[in-house]
Amino acid sequence: EAGVVQSPRYKIIEKKQPVAFWCNPISGHNTLYWYRQNLGQGPELLIRYENEEAVDDSQLPKDRFSAERLKGVDSTLKIQPAELGDSAVYLCASSLSMNTGELFFGEGSRLTVL
Amino acid sequence: AQSVTQLGSHVSVSEGALVLLRCNYSSSVPPYLFWYVQYPNQGLQLLLKYTSAATLVKGINGFEAEFKKSETSFHLTKPSAHMSDAAEYFCAVEETSGSRLTFGEGTQLTVNP
């Protein structure tokens, strides 16, 4: 069974540039999560989807971050424009439902903003 | 609001020694508790979870954790460390089923030969 797939694995951009990350969850998983992990810290939830609906986006900085999950499968997280403080690893995870607590994580997309 | 505190950002043990990684939680209700492990350049994976069925929870790779309500703790242990256990370990709490999963800051475990 394929795991959660994320791309790109690494991205280096200059500040004020846009960037997008893509995530393909495990087949059949209805719930999809985007987390941000700063160096030396634990993951912090940015947004959680139940199928196509964003059910928890209170931590998403909506002035520059956006996300979508069309058709309830793949998801894209976008930052525009990027700031120096956005340098982090962006993790995508999926689970069968919101009620299991068992999340399956991808390897992450490491963003460096110069 | 729920939170977790992991005592010790770095723990170093010798191969074969006991592993003890500490986690304390703050929650207004009995929570759901989890330990995740992150090996270098890999995604996080679930080690074990507590969901009120039993206070001593066994996970993968010989790890276990005990839920102690009186101490608001959920410490992770393994009787004998192996070199392959070197990784970062995260404690996480979910206040109610389906609510947001909140992670601690992680503990980096080093295993010395």
Image: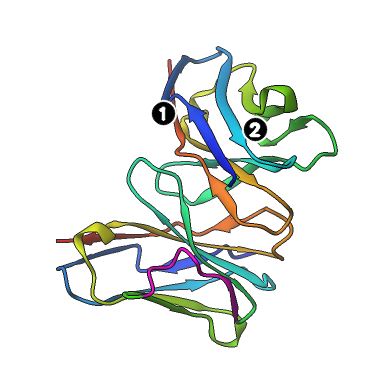
Q: Image height check: is B109 above or below A80?
A: above
From the viewer's perspective, is B113 left or right of A102? Answer: left
Q: Position of residue A61 (x, y in %)?
A: 38, 68
Magenta part, dominant SS: loop
Whether residue A16 is visible: yes
* Colour scheme: rainbow
Mark positioned earlier in the residue sequence (2 or 1): 1
Which picture quadrant has residue B109? top left
Q: Image height check: is B73 above or below B16?
A: below
- Kindly identify which residue carries mark 2: B61
Amino acid bearing label 1: Ser
Q: Residue at x 61, y 56 (%)?
A: B100
Amino acid bearing label 2: Asn
Q: Residue at x 55, y 12 (%)?
A: B17
Question: Dot 2, how many residues are within 10 Å of its Cα: few (below 14), some (14-19), or many (20+)?
Answer: few
For label 1, the SS is: loop
Q: Residue furthest bottom?
A: A71
Q: Residue furthest right?
A: B53
Q: Image height check: is B110 above or below A36?
A: above
Q: Position of residue A15 (x, y in %)?
A: 16, 68
> Circle 2 marks a residue in which chain?
B
User: For the magenta stretch, what is the residue range?
Assistant: A53-62
Q: Residue at x 56, y 19 (%)?
A: B19
From the viewer's perspective, is A46 left or right of B23? Answer: left
- Kindly identify which residue carries mark 1: B9
Question: Dot 1, how many residues are within 10 Å of its Cα: few (below 14), some (14-19), or many (20+)?
Answer: some
**Cα distance, mark 2 to mark 1?**
21 Å
Q: Position of residue A67 (x, y in %)?
A: 44, 77
Q: Quadrant of the C terminus of chain B?
A: top left
**Relative depth, front residue between A74 and A61:** A61
Whether residue B111 is visible: no
